[in-house]
Image (spheres, rainbow, N blue to C red):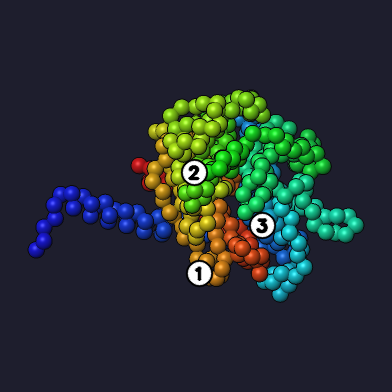
Amino acid sequence: MKLFTFPQLLALKTFLASCFLCSYLQCFAQNPAHEWDALFQQTEGWLGADGIYSLDLGFDSASGIQFELYAPQLLWFSDTFCGETRNNGTEYGKRQMVNHSFAIMEERSPDKRNIHFFFKRDVNSAKAENIIEGHYWLQDGIRYGDKIWLTGILVGEAWKPCRIDTITIALDPETNRPDFSKIKIDNQAPLSIKRSDAQAVWGAAILDECDDGYIYVYGYVDRFKEGSRKDMVVARVPREKFEDYDEWSFFDGNKWTKDRETVFESRAAVVQDVSTEFSITPIPVKTDKKKYILVYTPGTISEKVAFRVGDSPTGPFNEEQVFYSSPIPREMRGVRCYNAKAHPTFSNNNGLLVSYNVNRLGNLARKPDEYRPRFIWLKWDVALKTAE
C-alpha cells in the first residue's frame, strides 16, 4: 500500500475541499430567476438589450440618505433593439437598434405591469433614436441630489472607448422621475487615460453605500499587450465633492494618491481579469466586519459568473468563486455570455439578484431570445461562507 507524506496529504485535502466547494457553489449558490427573465421577454417596443444597470431613485448619494423607501427604480441599457416580433415573440419582425434605452419600475417585483421602457422615436418617421445624442454605451450611475449622474462610453475603433463622458439627467421634482428633455453632457471629464500599451477607464461600477463619507468609482485598465486583460482599479471622492474631479483620489495598491497615472502600475490592480462591467455591493448580513462582494464575468466573455468577497471597498478580495455556468452557449450555438453584475436594489435578505448579457457576438442576434439579459440569485450565506 502506498503511503502519503504529510505535504501530499495536505495537498490532497486541499484538492478535495476545493472540489467540494465547487460542487457546493454550483448546487447551492444560485437559483435561476425565471421571473426576471420573463420580465424582459417583450414582444413589441423594447425587444432586448445588453449593458443593464439599475438604481434606486429613493437613495441620494450626495447625502448618503435613503429618503424614500418605496421609490421607483431606474434601469438603463446599452445597444437596444426596438420594434416588433412575430410568432408569439419567438422571431423578429421589423426592428431597429438604438445605442441605449431606459426603463422605470414602479415596484421592485418583476411584474410586466410595473415596468415602462423609454427610447426616442422621430415624430415624423417613427424611426428609433438615441435619447442621449451620441453613440454611447452607458456605464454605472447614481442619483446625486436633483439629477441622475452616469458615465457613457463613446465607442471608437475595435469597440474600444475613445472617450468617457459624464451624463446628467435632471429629475422632475414632482414625480421623482428622469426628465429626458434635460440632459447635459460633459465631454471633458478626465475618466479615461490611454497609452500605447494600455487604457484606463472609470465608471464600470460605483459604490455609494459606505459609512466613511466617500463614493467609490471603479474601472479597469485594459492591458492591450497582455491579451487585453481587464484589471480592476479604484478611485474615491468625498460625497460632497463628487463632481469636482480635482478631489478624486486613486488607489495605488497601498495608499490613495491624486496621480491618475498610478493605476497603470501592476500593484494598483485590486483584482485581475474582470469584465468591462461588474458590480461592488455591501453584504447586508451582519458579520464581525463589513464585507463587500464583487460580481463579474471572468475575462468579460464567458459562460461563467463569478464573485469575490473583500474586507473593504479596495479589498483584499478572496479567491475567485465561479458559482454559475450558463447553459446558453450550449443551447444556442454562436451565442455568448458576458458582463455579469449584481442589482442590489432588487435583492432581498436571501440573495443578490445577478444579471448577465447574451448576444451573438460579431453578428446581429437572429431571434429575441439571443439578446436579452438573464438572471440568477446568489445566496448571501454562500457568499459569506466562502469568505470565512
Where is residue 368 shown, x and y percent of the image? 66, 66
Q: Nearer the viewer, residue 156 or 204?
A: 156
Q: Residue placed at 50% from the left, 66% from the top?
A: 327
Q: Earlier in the sequence, mark 1 or mark 2?
A: 2
Marks 1/2: CA–CA distance: 28 Å
The location of residue 245, given as percent across then percent down, is 64, 28
State which tag comes first along the sequence, 1 or 3: 3
State the quadrant of the N terminus: bottom left
Neighbour tally class for label 2: few under 14, some 14-19, many 20 plus, Cα within 10 Å = many
Q: Which residue in the structure is indicated by mark 1?
A: 330
Give the residue at mark 2.
231
Measured along the vertical axis of the image, is residue 19 above or below residue 283?
Answer: below
Q: Amino acid at mark 1?
A: Arg
For marks 1 and 3, give the CA distance.
21 Å
User: Closer to the camera: disc 2 or disc 3?
Assistant: 2
Q: Nearer the viewer, residue 13 or 186?
A: 186
- Disc 3 residue type? Ala
Residue 316 placement (x, y as % from top left): 41, 37
| Neighbourhood count class around disc 1 (C-alpha, 10 Å): few under 14, some 14–19, many 20 upward | few
Q: Residues within 10 Å of mark 3 (few under 14, many from 20)?
A: many
Q: Is residue 15 above or below residue 145?
A: below
Question: What is the secondary structure assignment of the residue under circle 1?
Answer: helix
